[in-house]
Image (cartoon, rainbow, N blue to C red):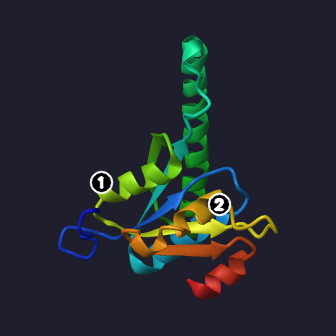
């Protein structure tokens, strides 16, 4: 059970949570969240989840190097998207790096931060579907602890400006 949301109580401020990944449509989620946050006075929190499934225990030395490289890549990715959000709406997002299963880490962060009010995802416009994260999370949409905004990946900056 997720904690009660306190986004609009005194001393709190709502946050849009954006999951940062390598997909081309990720920029659409960042753009949407930054514009909405800038317009509504909300914050943005960017989450990068590093999967751990490909780390074999017999390669501990290599796994440590891989983990350090993945953290450096995650920091660089978050810095790039934070700069993008700042350029879009003049906001400075919070940045979080987690390791593990993306769905579990998203849910855990939402449970830990009672100011997260909306999860913003972008859907790919490929014929294979909207992407694994959107597909996986929407399966539990009826019991998810907060609303999800799913931004179509084909929308342009102008399209999103008109909606936000």
Determine whether 105 is above or below 138 in the image. above
Residue drawn at (51%, 61%), measured in percent from left and top? Answer: 18
Taking the image as shown, residue 5 lies to the left or right of residue 74, namely left
Q: Is residue 161 visible?
A: yes
Give the image location of residue 69, x and y in percent. Answer: 60, 27
Q: Distance between the residues labelled 1 and 2?
A: 23 Å
Where 96 sits versus 90, above or below? above
Q: In which quarter of the image is the C terminus?
A: bottom right
Residue nearest the observer in this picture, 132 or 23: 132
Is there any visible trace of residue 94 in the rendered image?
no
- Residue at the image point whose x is 61% and y is 36% from the top: 73
Q: Residue 51 carries which label?
A: none
Q: Residue at x 66, y 62 (%)?
A: 27
As drawn, the residue found furthest toward the right would be: 127
Q: Position of residue 75 (x, y in %)?
A: 54, 39
Which residue is nearer to you in this view: 138 or 66?
A: 138
- Residue 23: name its quadrant: bottom right
Residue 79 picture location, percent across and down: 56, 47
Q: Of callouts 1 and 2, which one flags the residue occurring earlier in the amino acid sequence?
A: 2
For label 2, the crowd category at 10 Å Cα-Cα, with few meaning under 14, some 14 to 19 and many 20 or more, is: many
Looking at the rendered structure, the secondary structure element under dot 2 is: helix
Which residue in the structure is indicated by mark 2?
26
Residue located beneath label 1 in the image: 112
């Amino acid at each position: 059970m997720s904690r009660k949301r306190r986004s609009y109580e005194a001393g709190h401020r709502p946050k849009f949570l954006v999951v940062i990944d390598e997909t081309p449509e990720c920029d659409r989620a960042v753009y949407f969240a930054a514009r909405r946050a800038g317009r509504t006075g909300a914050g943005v929190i960017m989450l990068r989840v590093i999967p751990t499934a490909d780390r074999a225990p017999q390669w501990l030395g290599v796994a440590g190097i891989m983990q350090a490289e993945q953290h450096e890549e995650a920091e660089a990715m978050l810095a790039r998207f934070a700069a993008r959000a700042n350029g879009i709406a003049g906001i400075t997002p919070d940045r979080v790096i987690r390791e593990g299963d993306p769905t579990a880490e998203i849910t855990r962060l939402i449970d830990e931060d009672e100011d997260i009010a909306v999860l913003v995802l972008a859907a790919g416009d490929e014929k294979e579907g909207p992407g694994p994260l959107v597909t996986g999370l929407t399966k539990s949409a009826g019991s998810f602890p907060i609303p999800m905004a799913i931004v179509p990946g084909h929308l342009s900056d102008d399209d999103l400006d008109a909606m936000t």
